[in-house]
């Protein structure tokens, strides 16, 4: 397979001059060629230590995780009619498709077009990568807490044992999202998708889509055993902060309603709701606490 086959060009477009006639700029083509050369030189191969780390940690924590998973499954069975698990096609290593497994936290036959539109908006804008959980009627009781704590992702340990995912890596995206990943962004698929990653512990909900991709590519290029262990250790505090922030938001959203019931003389102050979004307890990607700087990613921005 050569570069043009990899990019899906027809036989009539397999020289640089014809590629230019397709409207691609030289810098864009250079970025894609560089990524293709990484794949051809086996830079995208998954290191053996990663597989050993995944299997070892999953087996060591399996008794505790199985108990937690059983409790969540019981909650879902009691609180919401329908299946306990939810499967969805995702895009993994080098664009390979696979079925991801999650605990179901939405009502059966929930409309997914809203989520698709929200994702498309995030891809086109510089808005923070916030979920639609707040006020989402599609979510089952207690589903928001399960999602905020990342517990809905526990069944993906099965994907990890299958070798479709890893503990640390970029989050696997939907096929419709993958279709909008162009040129340099596709480099984030040069490693296995993971349960947690550099993006998740670097401010997740306070980063834009562009920043998320930069963090994922940075991890793809620099992954080491030490970095994986550091990210795993930082994941639990990050989830605790995420749950705490969700609790804060709920309190601040309910405060105006409580004030309106107490008195009609004063309008509720919603400034705090906007403030809490800016003052996240997550370490930012430039934070000294994290101790890393994102290197510039090759390619046009």
Image (tube, rainbow, N blue to C red):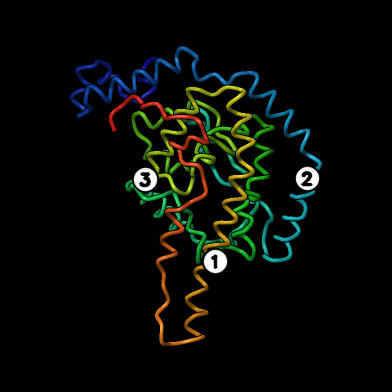
88 shown above or below 232: below
- 283 horizontally vs 61: left or right: left
Viewer-nearest of discs 2 and 1: 1
For label 1, count other residues whose C-alpha is less than 10 Å away and answer few (under 14), some (14-19) or many (20+).
few
Q: Nearer the viewer, residue 279 or 87?
A: 279
Q: Which residue is mark 2?
A: 66
Q: Nearer the viewer, residue 245 or 109?
A: 245
Question: Which residue shows up at 32% across the image and 46% down it?
Answer: 124
In the drawing, what numbered circle is on residue 123? 3
Disc 3 and disc 2: Cα gap in Å?
A: 36 Å
Q: Measuring from the top left, give residue 125's x and y in whole percent.
A: 32, 48
Residue 92 in view, yes or no: yes
Name the secondary structure under disc 3.
Answer: helix
Disc 2 and disc 1: Cα gap in Å?
A: 30 Å
Question: Which residue shows up at 43% across the image and 36% down it?
Answer: 286
- 165 horizontally vs 64: left or right: left
Q: Measuring from the top left, give residue 282's x and y in whole percent.
A: 52, 46
For label 2, count other residues whose C-alpha is less than 10 Å away and answer few (under 14), some (14-19) or many (20+).
few
Q: Measuring from the top left, give residue 218's x and y in whole percent.
A: 45, 28
Name the secondary structure under disc 1.
Answer: helix
Question: Which residue shows up at 45% across the image and 53% down it?
Answer: 279
Name the secondary structure under disc 2.
Answer: helix
Q: Measuring from the top left, give residue 184's x and y in whole percent.
A: 36, 28
Q: Nearer the viewer, residue 187 or 249?
A: 249
Q: Which residue is mark 1?
A: 250
Numbered circles on residues, count: 3
């Amino acid at each position: 397979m050569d570069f043009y086959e990899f990019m899906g060009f027809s036989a009539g477009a397999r020289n640089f001059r014809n590629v230019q006639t397709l409207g691609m700029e030289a810098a864009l083509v250079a970025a894609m060629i560089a990524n293709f050369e990484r794949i051809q030189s086996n830079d995208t191969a998954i290191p053996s230590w990663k597989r050993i780390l995944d299997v070892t940690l999953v087996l060591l924590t399996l008794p505790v995780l199985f108990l937690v998973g059983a409790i969540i499954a019981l909650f879902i069975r009691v609180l919401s009619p329908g299946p306990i698990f939810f499967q969805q096609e995702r895009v993994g290593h080098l664009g390979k498709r696979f079925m991801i497994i999650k605990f179901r936290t939405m009502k059966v036959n929930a409309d997914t077009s809203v989520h698709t539109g929200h994702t498309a908006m995030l891809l086109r804008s510089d808005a923070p990568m916030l979920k639609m959980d707040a006020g989402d009627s599609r979510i089952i009781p207690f589903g928001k807490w399960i999602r905020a704590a990342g517990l809905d992702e526990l069944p993906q340990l099965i994907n990890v044992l299958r070798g479709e995912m890893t503990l640390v890596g970029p989050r696997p995206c939907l096929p419709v999202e993958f279709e909008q990943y162009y040129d340099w962004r596709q480099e984030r698929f040069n490693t296995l998708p993971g349960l947690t990653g550099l993006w998740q512990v670097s401010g997740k909900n306070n980063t834009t889509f562009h920043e998320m991709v930069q963090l994922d590519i940075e991890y793809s290029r620099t992954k080491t055993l030490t970095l994986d262990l550091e990210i795993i250790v930082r994941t639990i505090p990050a989830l605790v902060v995420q749950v705490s922030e969700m609790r804060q938001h709920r309190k601040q959203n309910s405060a105006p309603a409580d004030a309106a019931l107490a008195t009609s003389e004063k309008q509720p102050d919603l400034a705090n709701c906007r403030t809490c979004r800016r003052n996240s307890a997550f370490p930012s990607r430039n934070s000294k606490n994290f101790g890393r700087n994102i290197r510039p990613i090759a390619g046009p921005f």
